[in-house]
Image (spheres, rainbow, N blue to C red):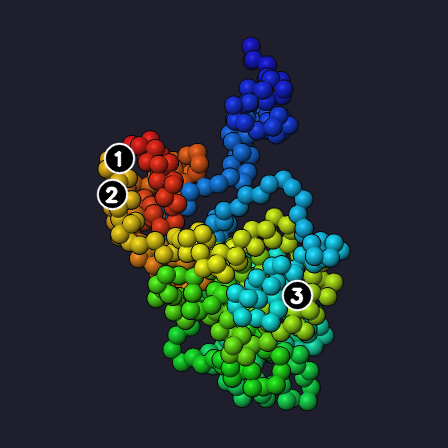
Amino acid sequence: MTSRPPSVDSLARSLAHIGLPHPLLVDAARQAIAAGDPQLAEQIANDIAQCLLVPVINATGVIAHTNLGRSPVAHTQTPRAQNLEFDLNTGQRGSRQAGIGQLVARACGAESAMVVNNNAAAVMLVLAALAHDRDVAVSRGESVEIGGGFRVPEVMEQSGARLLDVGTTNRTRLADYRKAIDRKTTDVALVLKVHPSNYRVEGFVEETSVDQLATLGVTVVSDIGSGLLDAACPWLNDGPPSWLNGEPAAKQTLAAGADLVTFSGDKLMGGPQSGFIVGRADLVQACAAHPLARALRPGGLVLASLHNTLLAYLARTAQKDIPFWRMATTSVKELRDRAQAIVQHTGVGQVVDCESLPGAGSAPGITIDSVGLVIDGDHLVALRNYQPPIIARVKDRATMIDLRTVDPTDDAVLIEALKKIH
Ligand SMILES: *Cc1c(COP(=O)(O)O)cnc(C)c1O
């Protein structure tokens, strides 16, 4: 005699310990029963739970890790209304862009600034607002793909602007832009310079700098990507770290003559996901007035977090208050002390020198000296299944835990997790 399959409801109730709302457990039970194996229900429910967004410990050494939400941000907010679009001076309707725009503009020496949901949106909005049905001159060496899905020719097409290829893949000179602009058949609205954030071309290469482009007499837009506000890093005690060398910064790009600069808020800026358009007030205004601006605007949660981020820059407390910069500038000695303490407490692993990355495609090919733990064998699954999940790397059949990207307050969690894997 074969036993009768359990009812969906009793099977779902037997999964209550997974902690999902009952309807989701019912879905898992149904799927398992339909597949003819009620035993599968627990695995299916666990898979559903694993898809939920939870805080994780980033032990990869990649600070702004694209798969882990880029820059870590601290943000709490009371459940109160917010003067999001209300002017406290006049008591009238205000703009959500006013406060953040003034802070960002001040931080990078721009006349004006606005914010959208990410940098892809910023570039799209600039092109749609300033170059619809017109030509945008881009160097063939900068017609790039950055991250998943940001491809210059495709963004251009979606914006309604026409891509005008200039120069060659490895060398594009000022004269190439001049020729393209002067051609009778072209109608160049702007020159777009795109920083090849996540790769580097070496050898017989030549690009045209922003200060040269500024002599062309057309609007120059520079997509710097990374969101470094000022190359001098006045918010860091010891000034700019050597690993930042060559990374374009908003302030200096504007000073070199760019009319507009676009960048992400969650890379080197260390804020929540967002994108900025900074520069000439009339051009920023044209972007803000375009119908797409409404579709691309961030909400109050993101704006509140961005306010805090920018206030930390202006107050020069960013090194301590913005997790990205705190992690990026933690001394190797401090990391080594923490690693030694963890090994001492757990008896697991060894202290090793390793190399961290700023991440999110910033500063390609550049590493930051770091210290972590190496543990024989591949323990990625056990660490990932720990509560909270710990994300590490495997190298040469050993598990690497880079402490630069682990908040020191999580060392105690690491210690408990490591004790368990042995
Ligand atoms: C990262 C990057 C983008 C895309 O920015 P998102 O904020 O991810 O939309 C675009 N351009 C450059 C140069 C970048 O580095």
Residue at the far front in the pictured view:
89
Queried on whether the Cβ of the residue with tag 3 lies below 8 angstroms from ligand 1, the answer reads: no
* Residue ID at (54%, 61%): 264
The mark nearer the N terminus, 2 or 3, is: 3
Q: From the viewer's perspective, is 196 left or right of 335?
A: right
Numbered marks: total: 3
Residue 255 in picture, x, y percent from top left:
52, 77
Question: Residue flagged by tag 2: what amino acid is it?
Answer: Gln
Which quadrant is the N terminus positioned in?
top right
In the rendered view, tell whether residue 240 sits above or below residue 397.
below
Residue at the far right in the pictured view:
92
Q: Disc 3 versus disc 1: distance between alpha carbons?
A: 53 Å
To which residue does mark 3 refer? 125
Q: From the viewer's perspective, is 17 left or right of 280?
A: left
* Residue ID at (45%, 59%): 316
To which residue does mark 1 refer? 345
Q: Quadrant of residue 160?
A: bottom right
Secondary element at image label 1: helix
The mark nearer the N terminus, 3 or 1, is: 3
Q: Disc 1 versus disc 2: distance between alpha carbons?
A: 9 Å
Classify mark 1: residues with Cα within 10 Å, few (<14), some (14-19) or many (20+): some
To which residue does mark 2 refer? 340
Question: Residue flagged by tag 1: what amino acid is it?
Answer: His
Q: Quadrant of residue 30?
A: top right
